[in-house]
Image (cartoon, rainbow, N blue to C red):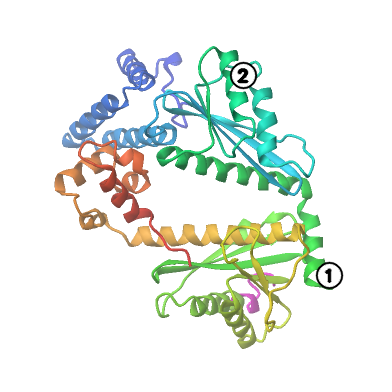
């Protein structure tokens, strides 16, 4: 079966020659020894040779191998680091704490571990890390540096104890810059996502629906929720998303996207009006169920346009709720807006329905961005590289060879791009921005 799905060459039953299998082993050793550049260059030579011989299927195999190797290298490569470092981050929310430890060894990210220590409500992330670190490293090898998300009250004492235990100097760094700050920020985002996921499991989705009923004053517990969001870059390739939730969670088979055309670029009000009109026109044809609550990612203007769209279709039994980002655009600071109300609705602090609203809003945001990227990428042609300052014909050709085509280049990160000869970090950033820069509206 592994052979049939092309995950094995089946040497045990002689479906690959000894010469080809020995070559696979040699390539594997090159990769494990850190000689990936040498391996990629060999594959590029083979790809070009087979293509010149008109063996395009085999050339495509080499191209795909190059792309997969690049993808693996990018995921595990830590720019600017050659030593051993652990990154320890903590987040606390709703009486639950999450600690994650990320391992970097010889410049390679080896993964992470997640812990949910039992705490009292008064415990802060600083105190949790203060207690966690000595317990975690009690019988473990300690790297030369620990990067932590919060300042520790007894940091110097911890450094002395860990240094004595490991028989080498250990530094605990709460304040970092440059690339290390980037790693720390990524780790913080990761631990916050893990915490939200844990909260979701613990509280239960149905309890959130009950909370939503109470906070919004619904006569009955909602059964079906929909949420709309808009994504574009300066008005181009505008895409609206509609995601659907029921009491069991996301109903992905009911998700829909709408390519928005015929409006002034950047007019989010018109985009919401068009998307809601198209969605609920299908409802009147019996193509899908009506939601109990329609969430709109936006403020009063977007909510008013959604209300107009439903009124035009004579749909009156759907509650509209706006989810406006707070002044700092931070999760948990959203404003809940109802049509015709001058002031945002006051939710009970810590209400589980707020997490449900954040969840459906974030899912609509993700789905809209994904659709926008797909539409934008479809519109792009290979000439997209030609408009990048400092990227001449030779470098463009080198990029396409190294990443196995345009798709590989578009998916590459900045670190992977600047690993190519002749591509500086500034140029790599321009290339990356060409494919990934976006403005969320």
Q: Nearer the viewer, residue 163 or 210?
A: 163
Asked if one can make out residue 430 in the rendered structure from this viewpoint, the answer is yes
Q: Nearer the viewer, residue 125 or 397?
A: 125
Left or right: 292, with 375 as reference point: right
Q: Residue 310's spot in the image, x, y percent? A: 63, 82
Residue at 74% across, 60% down: 353
Dominant secondary structure, magenta:
loop
Which stretch did the figure color magenta? 282-290
Residue matched to label 2: 161
C-alpha gap between disc 1 and disc 2 = 59 Å
Spot the residue most to the right.
219
In the image, residue 403 sits, relative to residue 7, either above or below, namely: below
Circle 1: is it few (<14), some (14-19), or many (20+) Cα within 10 Å? Answer: few
Residue at 56% across, 14% down: 166
The quadrant where residue 343 appears: bottom right
Residue at 72% across, 47% down: 199
Closer to the observer: label 1 or label 2? 2
Left or right: 420, with 274 as reference point: left
Q: Residue 150's spot in the image, x, y percent? A: 59, 39
The quadrant where residue 328 appears: bottom right
Q: Reply yes or no: does residue 360 show up in magenta.
A: no
Residue matched to label 1: 220
Q: Secondary structure at mark 1?
A: loop
């Amino acid at each position: 079966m592994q052979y049939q799905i092309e995950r094995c060459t089946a040497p045990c039953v002689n479906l690959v020659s000894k010469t080809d299998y020995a070559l696979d082993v040699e390539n594997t050793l090159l990769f494990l020894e850190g000689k990936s550049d040498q391996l990629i260059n060999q594959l590029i030579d083979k790809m070009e040779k087979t293509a010149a011989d008109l063996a395009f299927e085999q050339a495509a195999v080499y191209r795909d191998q190059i792309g997969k190797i690049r993808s693996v290298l990018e995921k595990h490569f830590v720019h600017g680091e050659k030593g051993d470092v652990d990154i320890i981050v903590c987040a606390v929310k709703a009486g639950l704490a999450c600690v994650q430890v990320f391992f970097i060894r010889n410049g390679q990210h080896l993964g992470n571990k997640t812990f949910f220590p039992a705490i009292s409500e008064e415990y802060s992330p600083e105190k949790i890390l203060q207690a966690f670190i000595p317990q975690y490293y009690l019988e473990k090898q300690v790297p030369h540096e620990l990067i932590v998300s919060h300042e520790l009250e007894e940091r110097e004492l911890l450094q002395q104890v860990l240094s004595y235990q490991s028989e080498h100097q250990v530094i605990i760094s709460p304040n970092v810059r440059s690339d290390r700050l980037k790693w720390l920020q990524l780790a913080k985002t990761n631990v916050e996502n893990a915490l939200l996921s844990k909260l979701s499991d613990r509280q239960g989705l149905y309890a959130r629906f009950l909370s939503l009923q109470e906070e919004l004053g619904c006569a009955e517990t909602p059964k079906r929720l929909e949420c709309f969001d808009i994504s574009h870059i300066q008005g181009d390739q505008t895409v609206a998303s509609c995601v659907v939730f029921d009491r069991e969670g996301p109903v992905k088979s009911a998700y829909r996207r709408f390519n928005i055309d015929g409006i002034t670029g950047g007019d989010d009000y018109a985009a919401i009006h068009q998307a809601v009109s198209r969605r609920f026109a299908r409802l009147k044809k019996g193509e899908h169920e009506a939601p109990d609550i329609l969430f709109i990612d936006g403020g009063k203007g977007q909510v008013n346009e959604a209300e107009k769209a439903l009124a035009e279709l004579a749909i009156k039994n759907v509650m509209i709720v706006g989810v406006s980002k707070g002044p700092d655009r931070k999760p948990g600071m959203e404003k809940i807006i109802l049509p015709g109300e001058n002031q945002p609705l006051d939710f009970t602090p810590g209400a589980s329905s707020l997490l449900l609203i954040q969840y459906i809003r974030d899912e609509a945001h993700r789905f809209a961005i994904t659709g926008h990227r797909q539409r934008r990428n479809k519109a792009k042609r290979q000439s997209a590289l030609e408009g990048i300052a400092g990227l001449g014909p030779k470098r463009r050709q080198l990029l396409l060879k190294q990443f196995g085509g345009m798709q590989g280049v578009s998916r590459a990160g900045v670190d992977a791009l600047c690993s190519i000869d002749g591509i500086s970090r500034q140029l790599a950033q321009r290339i990356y921005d060409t494919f990934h820069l976006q403005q969320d509206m």
